Image (spheres, rainbow, N blue to C red):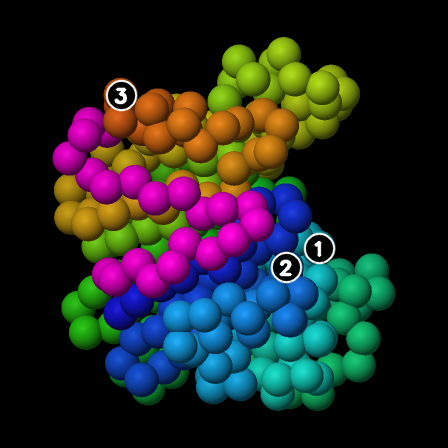
């Protein structure tokens, strides 16, 4: 299995996963041309993607889903409530091939399975994902709300993980956001701080790497995020950063 973060953050999210002959995209928050070019740079063709799987209705995860389908012919996997909300917000345009899934269930693509995990993030029907193939497990754990109980056994089972590490509390407190937005980000339906993400990763005894994702542009810094994780988790685990404007390149699981 391999994985690539094509982009991550409030300006757009998209992750590519390839396993056992199956090619998947998770979320469509970046424009089609950027996704196409960043995949082509590592020898992948977006038109060979088997499915686009949407995590929730926020624009930075779904705004280009309709484009991906109409331009590249990708089937869209989405919960009915997420689809309803996105269509109500006029984000998708005309759609054809849509496949529904329910939070908490599994989606199967041959020998590859995708477990969907409901999250308390402030979306109508948000989920995180675990991709399993050939005994390997990759977590895509972003937009989580808070460190809810089910995350610990999930992380303990993973071989690699993308995990949101959105903000540094001191930077958020002293930063430019209005008070209501600071409360939303740090509240129980917002995002994980660097410290919260790192404490979760202490459960990941099997992890080969962790990629810190969805970093805030104003309330975090990659060096601060990595330093916090090393202080809490230790130096043994390799950390990558999912960039706001570029891909990670190929990360083997």
Q: Which residue is mark 3?
A: 231
Tell me the crowding category of disc 2: few under 14, some 14 to 19, or many 20 or more residues within 10 angstroms, Cα based.
many
Secondary element under disc 1, as helix, strand or loop, is helix
The answer to whether one can see residue 57 in this image is: yes
Mark earlier in primary sequence (2, 1) = 2
* Chief secondary structure of the magenta portion: loop
Please name the residue shown 57% across and 34% down the image. 216
Quarter of the image for residue 203 reads top left
**2 and 1 marks in contact (CB < 8 Å):** yes
Mark earlier in primary sequence (3, 2) = 2
Q: Position of residue 230 (x, y in %)?
A: 26, 27
Residue 250 among magenta residues: yes
The answer to whether one can see residue 163 in this image is: no
Mark earlier in primary sequence (3, 1) = 1
Residue 96 among magenta residues: no
Q: Which disc, if any, is residue 59?
A: 1
**In the picture provided, is 174 more to the left or to the right than 168?**
right
Instruction: Identify the magenta region.
Output: 233-253
Q: Position of residue 115 (x, y in %)?
A: 38, 65
The answer to whether 32 is drawn above or below residue 244 in the figure is: below
Q: Which residue is mark 2?
A: 29
- Estimate the spatial distance between the alpha carbons at disc 3 and disc 2, rounded to whole Å: 32 Å
Secondary element under disc 3, as helix, strand or loop, is helix
Quarter of the image for residue 140 reads bottom left
């Amino acid at each position: 299995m391999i994985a690539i973060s094509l982009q991550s953050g409030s300006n757009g999210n998209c992750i590519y996963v390839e396993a056992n002959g199956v090619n998947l995209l998770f979320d469509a928050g970046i424009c089609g041309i950027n996704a196409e070019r960043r995949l082509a740079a590592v020898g992948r063709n977006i038109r060979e993607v088997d499915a686009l799987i949407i995590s929730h209705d926020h624009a930075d995860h779904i705004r280009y889903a309709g484009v991906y389908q109409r331009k590249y012919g990708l089937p869209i996997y989405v919960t009915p409530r997420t689809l309803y909300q996105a269509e109500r917000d006029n984000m998708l345009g005309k759609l054809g091939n849509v496949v529904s899934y329910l939070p908490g269930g599994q989606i199967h693509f041959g020998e590859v399975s995708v477990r969907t995990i409901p999250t308390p993030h402030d979306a109508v029907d948000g989920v995180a994902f675990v991709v399993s193939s050939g005994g390997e497990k990759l977590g895509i754990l972003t937009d989580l709300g808070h460190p809810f109980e089910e995350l610990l056994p999930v992380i303990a089972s993973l071989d690699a993980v993308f995990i949101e590490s959105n903000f540094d509390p001191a930077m958020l407190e002293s930063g430019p956001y209005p008070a209501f937005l600071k409360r939303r980000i740090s509240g129980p339906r917002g995002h994980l701080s660097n410290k919260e993400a790192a404490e979760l990763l202490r459960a990941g005894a099997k992890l080969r790497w962790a990629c810190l994702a969805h970093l805030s542009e104003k309330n975090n810094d990659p060096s601060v995020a990595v330093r916090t994780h090393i202080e809490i988790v230790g130096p043994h685990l390799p950390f990558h950063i999912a960039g706001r404007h570029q891909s990670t390149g190929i990360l083997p699981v």
